Image: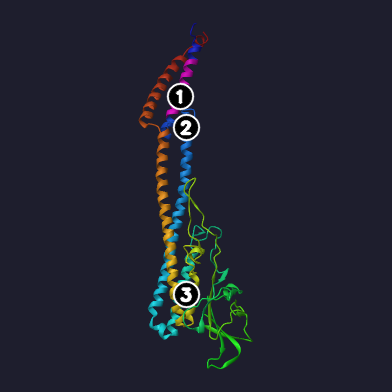
């Protein structure tokens, strides 16, 4: 078969087009730094790359979750440390007052009450600490685990004859309930039952002396009133089975109640493993559930402040044990938070190693050899130049040569 000029042209054009494609391919590898840029170049490598990309994406997602968890743990630990320090300050305040308590100096005790109020406000602020708009101790169900809208009247305590330490009471004998609006509700209330006047004269009716943070009023009632409504929005109820004795004093505080969820969000660290999140406000502030010790931190400081406002040295001394227990409760939960932070940081470190390993493996799977690519690029470019010269010679023919 005779090779015509037309056949030579088509063969040269085809070869030239193939060489253009080869140059373009090598140039793309040079620009991207990847040996495989399309599935057809190396199906097996491309498939491995898809698997590695999926795994890397999963690890990066877990790492982001763990990063946020570590920040929350660290912030929670710092917040609890502040609360612990405030209770340590309150404890030291009681111990250092010493002589002032014995002398019952009202001006000293009321000055100390302002310091305790500042401690109360600090604990309240750190209990509401947020990270990126999410409360640290919320449990993930509400943005306001503590605030001034939902109040809790704490358990009622009693001292017989308004002297000595707090006495145990039968649950349900004495109760308190909030009925007022937030700006009317006090931090602490003391109610003293009297049947005799200060000089020992029997009273025609029973009297209740209601003392709210140092401001006292007297309520007269025939017989034994079952419910006393405090002007500031609190009801105090005495059950018929528990008639108070002369001079018996009852104490309770009104503090914000916990409004968060039962538990903080879980921290996902693998497809099959989760870590517990931060402790909740119910555990930390109200002392619910072990390792909580049953101490309401806000109520403890509110009660201590009320005792100082009333210049009641016996009541102040009675709060020492509760304050110490509150400090221990904060310390316990700080230790738990610290352990969880260490666990999360350890997992984050492992995820960082996994991420680096996957990134290296993925890169090597499709990574181009720079020296090889440059060598091939030079060879392909030279070949293209030679073929271009040859094509000009083929095309530089007469019409008669072309149709032969």
Disc 3 residue crowd, few under 14, some 14–19, many 20+, Cα 10 Å? some
Specify the principal SS of the magenta part.
helix
Q: Is residue 395 above or below residue 291?
A: above
| In the image, farthest residue toward the right | 222
Residue at 42 percent of width and 33 percent of height: 365
- Residue wearing tag 2: 46
Q: In the visual, does 402 lie left or right of 238?
A: left
- Residue wearing tag 1: 20
Tell me, for residue 117, which label it has, or none.
3
Residue at 49 percent of width and 39 percent of height: 54
Quadrant housing residue 319 = bottom left
Q: Is residue 17 magenta?
A: yes
Q: Is residue 372 above or below residue 396?
A: below
Which residues fall within the magenta stretch?
10-26
Tag 3's secondary structure? helix
| In the image, farthest residue toward the top | 1
Tell me the mark number nearer the camera, choosing from 2 and 3: 3
Q: Nearer the viewer, residue 362 or 307?
A: 307
Q: Residue 210 appears at what percent x and percent y?
A: 56, 82
Name which of mark 3 and mark 1 comes first in the sequence.
1
Residue at 46 percent of width and 14 percent of height: 394
Q: Nearer the viewer, residue 229 or 78?
A: 229
Q: Residue 113 appears at what percent x and percent y?
A: 46, 78
Tell me the mark number nearer the camera, choosing from 1 and 2: 2
Quadrant housing residue 225 = bottom right
């Amino acid at each position: 078969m005779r090779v015509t000029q037309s056949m030579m042209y088509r063969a040269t054009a085809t070869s030239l087009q193939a060489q253009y494609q080869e140059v373009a391919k090598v140039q793309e590898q040079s620009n991207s730094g990847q040996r495989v840029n399309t599935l057809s170049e190396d199906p097996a490598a491309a498939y491995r790359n898809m698997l590695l990309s999926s795994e890397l994406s999963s690890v990066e997602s877990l790492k982001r979750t763990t990063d946020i968890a570590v920040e929350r743990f660290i912030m929670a630990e710092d917040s609890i440390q502040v609360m612990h320090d405030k209770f340590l300050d309150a404890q030291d305040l009681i111990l250092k007052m010493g002589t002032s308590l014995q002398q019952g100096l009202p001006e000293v005790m009321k000055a100390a009450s302002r310091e305790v109020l500042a401690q109360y406000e600090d604990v309240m602020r750190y209990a509401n600490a947020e990270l990126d708009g999410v409360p640290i101790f919320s449990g993930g169900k509400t943005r306001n685990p503590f605030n001034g809208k939902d109040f809790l009247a704490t358990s009622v305590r009693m001292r017989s004859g308004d002297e000595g330490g707090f006495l145990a009471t039968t649950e349900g004998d004495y109760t308190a309930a909030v009925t007022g609006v937030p700006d009317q509700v006090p931090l602490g209330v003391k109610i003293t039952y009297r049947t005799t006047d200060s000089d020992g004269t029997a009273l025609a009716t029973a009297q209740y002396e209601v003392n709210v943070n140092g401001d006292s009023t007297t309520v007269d009632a025939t017989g034994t009133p079952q419910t006393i409504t405090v002007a500031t929005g609190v009801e105090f109820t005495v059950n018929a089975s528990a008639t108070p004795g002369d001079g018996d004093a009852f104490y309770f505080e009104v503090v914000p109640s916990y409004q968060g969820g039962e538990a903080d969000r879980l921290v996902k660290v693998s497809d099959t493993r989760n870590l517990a999140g931060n402790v909740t406000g119910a555990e930390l502030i109200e002392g619910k559930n072990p390792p909580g010790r049953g101490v309401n931190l806000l109520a403890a400081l509110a009660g201590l402040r009320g005792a100082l406002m009333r210049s009641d040295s016996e009541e102040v001394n009675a709060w020492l044990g509760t304050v110490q227990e509150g400090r221990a409760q904060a310390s316990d939960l700080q230790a738990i938070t610290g352990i969880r932070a260490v666990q999360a940081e350890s997992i984050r470190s492992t995820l960082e190693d996994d991420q680096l390993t996957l990134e290296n493996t993925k890169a090597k799977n499709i990574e181009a050899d720079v020296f090889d690519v440059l060598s091939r690029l030079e060879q392909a470019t030279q070949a293209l130049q030679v073929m271009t010269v040859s094509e000009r010679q083929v095309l530089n023919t007469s019409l008669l040569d072309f149709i032969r």
